[in-house]
Image (tube, coloured by chain):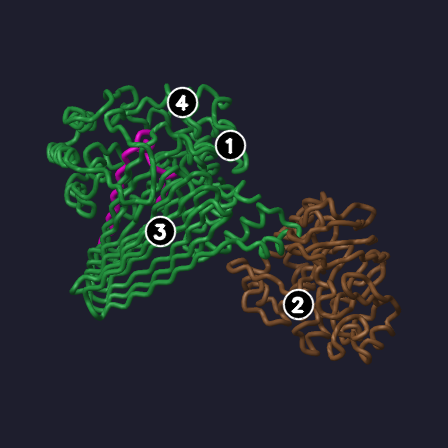
Amino acid sequence: MLEIKNLHANVAGNEILKGLDLTLPAGEVHAIMGPNGSGKSTLAYVLAGKEDYEVTEGSITFKGKDLLEMDPSERAIAGVFLAFQYPMEIPGVATMTFLRSAVNAVRKARGEEELSTPDFLREAKAKAKDLKIDVEMLRRPLNVGFSGGEKKRNEILQMALLEPGLCVLDETDSGLDIDALRIVADGVNGLRSKERAMLVITHYQRLLDYIVPDKVHVMSAGRIARSGGPELAHELEKSGYAEFGGEATAA
Amino acid sequence: MPAVQETVERVKEIEVDKYKYGFFTDIESVKAPKGLNEDIVRFISAKKDEPEWLRDWRLEAYRRWRTMQEPAWANVQYPKIDFEDLYYYAAPKSTEGPKSLADVDPELLKTYEKLGIPLKEQEVLAGVQGAPKVAVDAVFDSVSVVTTFKEELAKAGVIFCSISEAVKNHPELVKKYLGSVVPATDNFYATLNSAVFSDGSFVYVPEGVRCPMELSTYFRINAENTGQFERTLIIAEKGSYVSYLEGCTAPMRDENQLHAAVVELVALEDAEIKYSTVQNWYPGDAKGKGGVYNFVTKRGDCRGDRSKISWTQVETGSAITWKYPSCILRGDGSRGEFYSIAISNGYQQVDSGTKMIHLGKDTSSRIISKGIAAGYSNNTYRGLVSAHRKATNARNFTCCDSLLIGDKCGAHTVPYIEAKNASATFEHEATTSKISDDQLFYCLSRGLSEEEAVALIVNGFVRDVLQQLPMEFMAETQKLISISLEGSVG
């Protein structure tokens, strides 16, 4: 599903990714761990196509297509979804309006029929309920005044509605208490499927107790330094990131 | 354009001949020579068969105008207007328009397409030669057609007609109120308008009557020649209510480059007037050539105690907008409101705002202004809030927000605040923001195109004001905002 080869990327002239290789088959969930500054979030933004993240070398193919040739909305339409670490606030735009605009923009571009307002509301409300999202929250302006938990649940709701092929979750556990973490993880697990691949970026092992990955990769200095099974996460919990260039206390 | 289409449908249902002969007056073939002098003013007055007092009023205004200077304080630039090179009566519309749609600015045609306006109607809006007159009337002139409306209004005792008709049929009302809010000597453009005004709307709502429907210029008689120097007068008697809608979301081409309208509102005791405008005149081509200059004087007088006047405007068209719908809060406890969305793109220049003049006790006013500048445009909010010595406990809240799209446009806020009574409470908030790259990226990463993303963010930005618009205008306006901002990113 996703094939990254020798990826080099600069941010503001500094090389952050330095030859990253990663293969993520459909149906699998991979975790990316690593110390602060190892390039985890940069990888997420490069996948989503953020401006100012300049790819200097290497390739990314998604479902056989060159992802780097596409602009951010084309990637979203092709099925790439990034759950943001810090979702943006858009004052005055009701969350429901935003969701409907996004769903219909994607459906239109994919050549599907746009959802009528009642159909959309039915679907959105059902999926919101799974994530224990109150309908009242969907009437509020997008992410404005949302708690950390509400923002992250809202990201997962968008993911559920847009039905992407590749889900990239950037530190989705940050700022969540244990109850919120469980709800979010349940939501994510509910979206695991044979047709879908997930890349779960996290600093802490805790999230991976709830979203159990097929593989764990540890990033260090812009590359994958080590890969293994879920047990690797537990190992890191004990030893920390010291051997990967992070501070021993980081984990 | 559902409202327009609806009107067209209605017109189609009626016999065309009946319509044509029943409702069109005779002035179309006559035109006065270019330029302005006392004879032209007399000619206009005579053509309209006006009483002596009105002719003298016009002449007085004309003489005054000759002594006045064009105002230069607004933040707008344009070549000097040669007032001797204009027609002041019955501009020959049908001979100067483009020959076919092929001669019309293609950008304008694209906009029509997006608004879903049928081809025939496009021709009319673009002023194509020989375009069917019936449709013109259909779009802009349907009071007469929709007779049920008229009956309903008559039942309520509401007078809604052209100002020329009002001069004939209700001279005592016109004489009493015309120029009582915007005096003939008020300012350069208003004085010019007083001398040569062509036509406009007249509304009178009797005591205690709540006007049973939104009055709209969609449904007004004989609109063809009212464009350039339009004059509107609305009077709400004690305890009455009226909501008036002016304008059209479809951009209209007009060979009259200069528009100098005057609108006067009078609200007596406990009366309320709500006046909404959607202005989308031709803004000029991509280089800013050929757009309309819109120099308008709009003022409401809250003459009675506890009266209320509310202005809502959506300004997206015209090359230059110079417009300050204002409220004189004369009655004790009276209230004034100004809600504005002003969008400028391309090379448009907007200098708009309001004046809230607190004269009475316990008067309050509220100003919410949302300016959006894109392209190379300049967007200025200019507002005055003042409290007279006797205006004890005057209160005002002002919020001016500006949103910039791109880095070649400008947003300016020029608030004037004067309090001559120590008990006045005036609050002023202002923000200027840009659509952030992060907000844009967030939307794009959800599959929205840049234009969709900008439209969504801008519609959120103007939401407080959009909610003030009558329901039927809201959806159209949202669409209009998206279209006005096309090409503003990237």
Q: Amino acid at mark 1?
A: Glu
Q: Position of residue B248 (x, y in %)?
A: 41, 40
Residue type indicated by callout 2:
Lys
Residue located beneath label 2 in the image:
A152
Q: Residues within 10 Å of mark 4 (few under 14, many from 20)?
A: some
Dividing the image into 4 quarters, which one contains the C terminus of chain B? top right
Give the colour in which the image draws chain A.
Answer: brown
Q: Amino acid at mark 3?
A: Tyr
The residue singled out by tag 3 in the image is B381
Residue A46: % across, % down: 71, 55
Q: In this image, B355 relative to B448: left or right?
A: left
Lateral position of residue A81 relative to residue B260, left or right: right
Q: CA distance from mark 2 to mark 3?
A: 39 Å
Check disc 4 and report the residue beneath it: B97
- Residue A103 horizontal/vertical position (percent): 66, 53
- Hue used for the chain lettered B: green
The stretch in magenta equals: B215-237
Q: Are marks 2 and 3 on the same chain?
A: no
- Work out whether disc 3 and disc 1 sit on a shared chain: yes
Q: Which residue is mark 1?
A: B107
Asked whether the residues under the numbered discs 4 and 3 touch, taking CB atoms below 8 Å apart as contact, a structural biologist would say no
